[in-house]
Amino acid sequence: MLRRILLLLACLLSLNLARAQTPAAVAQVALEPVAVYLIPTENFPLLLAGNMAAMLGRDTGLTIRASAALPVEGLEPLRNSGQYAAEDFVEKVMPLAKTLSGVTPQTFFVVLTTRDLNTRAQNSLFYFASRASDTNMSVVSMARLLNYQDGLLMLDVTAATRVYKMSKRAIGEAQLGWVRNNDPDDLMFGQVSSIAALDRIGLEHKGVKRTAAPTPTEQLSVATVDGMLRLSIPASALTLAVPRQDWTVRERQPGDAPRAFYLSAQNGTLVMAGNFENAYGSHGVGRAWDNIEADIRARGEPEPSEVSIENIGGWKTLLFDQRGANSSSLVGYYVQDGTWISVRLILTKTGKPDARREALRQQLKAMKVSAKDAAGKTQ
């Protein structure tokens, strides 16, 4: 246990995130919906944010990513104070956070800042972290977690571990159902309001988890009908059917959105991920491309090329290649009767890009979107 803790602490400051990935691995990562985004702001160390995302993902089993630094210009300190309100961070960052690649309605955001934190009510001297109960965003401040050496603030392993603990507490409470307790050595010990208490708590939570099942109207259903895999949710007005002989449904994993689906074909070289959403939140392929391009750059993947927008049946689609990875992608949106279906297909295979793109078009054409009748049955 001690060896594991020491290894984790060292990795927080030294882990090299630019690890080589096979094209297939890159494709799988690109498809996963993100359970948690760490969002560094202003001067927060980007390397630390990336390392924390990798370690937290391993510790929790969730899909956790670090975004590029998001701007927070214009934030005003609280009156008669050098502190900043957590609520102001949420209002500033949330609109940008929702446009990040892989975000679903269930994604939780952890904003990382170097500014001293409080709330608008200023009902405490300070906060290491704060989350409004009606949001899926927590703000973690590093301002009081740094150490001093020769009168200068210093980010060392101890300080990085403090940030890690506060972030993991927020994620555990929001995404894993972890409940705070009275054990001063447990990660989820009560209200941590001092450095001494923060340094004492461990890196692990030993208590029971609180479970919450998806609501029946959101739970994805998969049925085989007439040789097709029929995907839908009760609240949706549409169903999506794909050829049964071509696709295998991936088993659901912790952190998966209840309305999302993940399939693979051709021995894993062809993968698909998608989601059912309310059409109110739909956006065009233009914004999708902005998000995808930013995400590709952030992960250091091969640059996209030959980007094209096409109408395929009732689908609005975006196609592009990543030649360095022998990969082509198709992103498609279908909006009808208040339902928005989004899919992304990725084919990783040697050969000509034109052939890969045509294969993706044919896969999309083989799918069938159908409306439900008043009784909720597919017409």
Image (cartoon, rainbow, N blue to C red):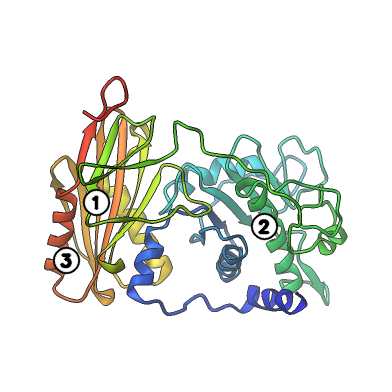
Few, some or many residues within 10 Å of mark 3 (<14, 14–19, 20+): many
Q: Kindly identify which residue carries mark 2.
A: 168
- Front residue of 184 and 162: 184
Q: How far apart are marks 2 and 3 (CA)?
A: 41 Å
| Residue sitting at x 29%, y 54% | 344
The amino acid marked with disc number 2 is Lys
- Front residue of 180 and 152: 180
Q: Is residue 301 visible?
A: no
Label located before the other in sequence (1 or 3):
1
Question: Mark 2 and mark 1 in contact (Cβ < 8 Å)?
Answer: no
- Residue 266 x, y percent position in the rendering: 24, 66
Q: Kindly identify which residue carries mark 3.
A: 356
The amino acid marked with disc number 1 is Arg
* Residue at disc 2, secondary structure: helix
Quadrant for the C terminus, please: top left
* Residue at disc 3, secondary structure: helix
Q: Which mark is residue 244?
A: 1
Q: Which of marks 1 and 2 is in front?
A: 1
